[in-house]
Every structure is written in C-alpha cells, then in structure tokens.
Image: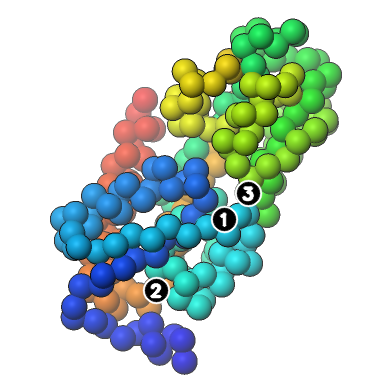
Amino acid sequence: MIAKLQNISFDSLPTRLVVHCSPYISMFTINVMRRVLDEIAPDCEIVHSTSGNSIAETEDALIFRKADIIFDAHPHISHSRVSQHIASEVPVMICRKSHPRLNGSLTPEQAAEESHIFVDSESASLLSNRLSVNALMQVDRKCRFISPSMLSIISMVESSDMVGFITERFYQKMKDSFDIQRLSIDVTLPSQPVYMIYNKAALNNQFFSTLVRKMSDIFMQEFKNNALR
C-alpha cells in the first residue's frame, strides 16, 4: 500500500520536504537542497530530522515516508531505493595543541600508547575503516571515548590527552575555534563515502525528479573539484 501511495505523481509543488541525516552531514548537504529549491520551489520549507546513529530508524524514515531524502554514511541498499555516492570524507587525526607527548605527527608506537576516541556508528563501512586504520598502523588502539557527534569528539580532544579522527572538512572549519592540532600519519587512511538515498518510486513525481537531478549535478561537481585538489 505504501509503495502504491508513493507512485502518486503530484502536479502542485510541495510546501515541505523532510531531510534525514546527522548534524555533521547536514552541514554540506542541506545547503545544496536549499540552493536548488531557491530555483525551483522558493516557498518550500525544509525540515531536518535526525535519529542518532540508528540504521534501523533511518530505514524506517524512508519506508514509512518520515523523510523524503536521507544522507548517510550507510548506503541502505534495496531494490526499491537509490543510494547515490555524493561525497568522500577524508579523515584527519587530531590532538590538543598542548598535548604533552605529541607535536605534529603520530607514529604507530605512539598510537599504541595513547588513548583514542572512536566514532559511534552501526555503519559497516565506518566499522571496516576503523579496523583498516588498526591494520595500517599495526596497532590495536585503546578506546576511551565513543560518540556519534564530531562536535563532541573535537570538544573532548581539546580538553584531554586523547586523540581522535574527524573529517578534513570539519577540521578546516573548526581548527581556529578549538585548541587542536593536526597529526600527520605515515599511512594513507581510507575515506568515508556519503550517500544520498531516496525511494525510486518518488521519481514518478516530476518535481522530486528535478530536485534530485539538480542536486546530483552539484554534488558531482563538488566531488570532482575535491578530487582535483
């Protein structure tokens, strides 16, 4: 029944769109939606919803039409959905500027002695990346703090001797506002994909199809620009 309802094509422009994603991902995705809506539906309201790091709750948001579009690090693969890769977030390891043992770099030996902060997530790709970092650095990192929020992670780093990963994008925005320094590591760290996810049936709506196409064009252009840097 839900699938049948989603196949209805509306002629009028919507007055409200619900976007489901983490606060961090919203920083670089919802503004793209706003830019497109300014062009095709300037009176449309954007509502941002979030459910922490629960994959099940995110799945329900699409199944039961609690959200029109989802942005997530988890692709939510299904025959009834589109999961489009729109960005790749590069990880950066940080510590506080006045860290008593670290200054600008981190060796595997130092990593083994320090306490680490992990991102709390049910995403298989994030968990796989965590194991990949351990394998690349050849160390089983000691975890002292876990959080789904990069703002919480960066706040904990500047007030303790713990080290943690945030994204390059977030680091560039926050490096002058927090007491943190970037640590160079002699390994190439795996990047984290970000996906735009929506129901295939929603593409029967001409407005939604146009919205997704224009957003995809912007994301792909930004993706290419970042790859060339």
- Decide: few, some or many residues near mark 2? Use Cα within 10 Å; few <14, some 14-19, many ≥20: some
- Disc 2 residue type (three-letter): Lys
Real-space CA distance between mark 2 and mark 1, rounded to the nearest whole angstrom = 17 Å
**Location of residue 77 by image quarter:** bottom right
Residue 203 is left or right of residue 162, and the answer is: left
Q: Earlier in the sequence, mark 3 or mark 1?
A: 1
Find disc 3 in the rendering and name its residue: 125
User: Which secondary structure, mark 1?
Assistant: loop
Residue at horizontal 75 percent and vertical 8 percent from the top = 101
Q: Earlier in the sequence, mark 2 or mark 1?
A: 1
Between 218 and 12, the one lying in front of the other is: 12
Real-space CA distance between mark 3 and mark 1, rounded to the nearest whole angstrom = 7 Å
Whether residues under marks 3 and 1 lie with C-beta atoms below 8 angstroms apart, the answer is yes
User: Which secondary structure, mark 2?
Assistant: helix
Find disc 2 in the rendering and name its residue: 200
Tell me if residue 187 can be seen.
no
